[in-house]
Each structure stands twice: as C-alpha cells, then as structure tokens.
Image (cartoon, rainbow, N blue to C red):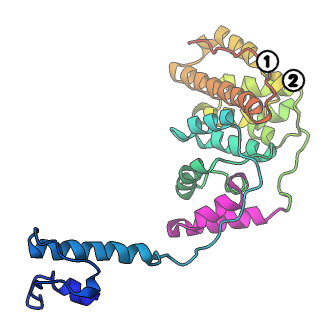
C-alpha cells in the first residue's frame, strides 16, 4: 500500500503515473476537483503522519545513572558569595568558601560545577580536596562525563575517597618572637591565637617587610584569624597611619593592599558564617584609611 502510494508521488524515472482512480488500499477517494498530482501528494503526506503516529518513537540506550546528592545545597546567600568569588576568580578566597561549605555540611549548587571544574583544571592552587567534597558524589560524576576533565576527575575521586586525617598538619605552640623571626610559623600555630599573637601578625603585615607577598600572606592570615579579634585590625591600621612617613610610596601601597586583603578575608568569613549557619555576627565593618 505504501509503496503504491509513494511511488506515484516520486520525481524521477521510477515515478508511476497518477492513476485515474485511487486504489482501494489507499483508504479514500481522490478529490476530482483537485489536480490529481496534488491529491496524490496529499494522501502520501497523510499516510506518513498516520504511520508515525502509530509507530514507536526511537530512543537511545539508557545511560549511566548519576549518584544522588544527599547533602543539602548551600543557601542562596552563600551561593551569591560564591558567584562573586568566581567573577573574577579569587582562588584563595574560593578555597575558603569550599572549606566552609564542607565544614557546615552543605554543597555547591550544580550551576557552579562547570566554572569550578574549568578553574580547577587549569589552576593547581584550587583546593581539590575541598572541591571534591563540596560538589559531592554527583558533582564528581558530572566532572567524569567530560573526557577533557579525566585527570581532574581522577584527582577529585581519589581525594574524596581518602578520608584519612592529614597527618602532616600539626598545630604547634609558637611565640611572638618566633613569628617575628619567621612570619610563616603562624600558619601552623595552634588556634585560637592569643591577643598578643594576633597583634604581632597584624604588625608584621603593616610593617611592609613582606613586600610583594604581603597581600597573599594577609589572605592566609585572614583565613585563620580569630573572628573575635576583628577589631584589632582597626588599631593596626591606625598605628600604620601614624608611621606611614617611614615607608616608601611603593611600600605604603603594598601595606595598604595587604591590610585590605586581610580585612576582606576576615569579613568574608563573617559573611560566610551568616550565610551557611543563618546566625548573623553583629560586627561593624572597618574602613581602611585611604593613604
């Protein structure tokens, strides 16, 4: 039936002539008021619609099933912070966000998996351990679907699977004099820091001795600074203002950038605490003097 009908509408050497009267198998009579060729093409089109409507739709084979994510997604406020840290990417602060998300038992929204994976694939400084835990099993599975991210996915999978504690990180007791001699010792100091130790670190940042690495050091300090010592930043900035004539213009700029990085990092932690926990911390934000 279909062969008889369609070959009457073909163009080419195999085309059959339009019949004077339709075959009974075609299921209807030709409208004699229409051009016979037009009537045959109309019947062929109708036949195709009926054939498709009565047939099975094509389907692809079932693919792999993504594992579920049982960890709740981070709050909209926390996701707004993440979006701001991604544009442009601020890796040190992004690591801070990822670690906080894991600590508060929340995960990254799926809409941020791609930009985070792209950033991690090209930057070894992004904390892959925190990233793997923050996106969860489903997020790691998502990364595995892209062949260009296979090395990253393998790294994330191994990091998530390794639940053993980091034995290389040992908190030690350090003194103010030891930190003045080697400022990096503060990174391994037991927390919470004392008031005097916190003042010492802030004084080091404000002294200008760190030069170009001052902002990066200040960010690392800000990630560890006890939040209750936030007000100490104001007195440190005031002391630097009093002695700013001792610094060169370049040194003054580096100090100001470092203090801004320190204040921004600590304030980010305050905002993240409120965003992840829903418990705001009432602190008045400090303003760094415009030297």
As rendered, which of 172 and 48 lies closer to the eye?
48
Quarter holding the C terminus is: top right
Quarter holding the N terminus is: bottom left
Main secondary structure type of the part rendered in magenta: helix
Q: Is residue 257 above or below residue 47?
A: above
140 within the magenta span: yes
The residue sitting at 80% across, 22% down in the picture is 281
Residue 56 percent across, percent down from the top left: 47, 78
Task: Tell me the residue that label 2 is attached to.
Answer: 196
The residue sitting at 79% across, 30% down in the picture is 278
Which segment is the magenta one? 134-163
As rendered, which of 133 and 194 lies closer to the eye?
133
Task: Tell me the residue that label 1 is attached to.
Answer: 282
Is label 1 in contact with label 2 (beta carbons under 8 Å)?
Answer: no
Q: Is residue 16 above or below residue 290?
A: below
Q: Is residue 117 left or right of residue 49?
A: right
């Amino acid at each position: 039936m279909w062969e008889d009908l369609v070959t009457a509408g073909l163009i080419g050497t195999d085309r059959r002539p339009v019949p004077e009267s339709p075959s009974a198998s075609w299921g209807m009579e030709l409208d004699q008021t229409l051009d016979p060729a037009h009537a045959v093409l109309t019947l062929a089109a109708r036949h195709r619609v009926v054939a498709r409507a009565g047939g099975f739709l094509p389907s692809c084979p079932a693919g792999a099933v993504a594992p579920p994510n049982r960890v709740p997604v981070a709050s909209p406020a926390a996701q707004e912070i993440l979006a701001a840290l991604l544009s442009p990417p601020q890796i040190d602060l992004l690591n801070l966000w990822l670690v906080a998300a894991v600590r508060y038992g929340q995960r990254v929204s799926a809409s941020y998996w791609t930009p985070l994976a792209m950033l991690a694939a090209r930057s070894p400084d992004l904390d892959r351990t925190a990233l793997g835990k923050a996106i969860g099993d489903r997020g790691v599975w998502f990364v595995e679907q892209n062949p260009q991210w296979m090395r990253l996915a393998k790294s994330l999978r191994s990091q998530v699977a390794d639940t053993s504690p980091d034995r290389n990180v040992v908190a030690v007791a350090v003194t103010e004099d030891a930190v003045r001699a080697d400022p990096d010792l503060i990174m391994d100091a037991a927390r919470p820091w004392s008031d005097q130790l916190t003042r010492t670190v802030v004084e080091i940042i404000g002294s200008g001795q760190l030069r170009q690495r001052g902002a990066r050091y200040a960010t690392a300090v800000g990630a560890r600074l006890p939040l209750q010592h936030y007000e100490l930043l104001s007195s440190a900035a005031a002391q630097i203002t009093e002695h700013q004539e001792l610094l060169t213009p370049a040194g003054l700029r580096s100090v100001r950038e470092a203090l801004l990085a320190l204040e921004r990092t600590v304030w980010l932690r305050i905002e993240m605490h409120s965003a992840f926990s829903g418990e705001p911390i009432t602190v008045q934000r400090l303003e760094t003097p415009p030297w």
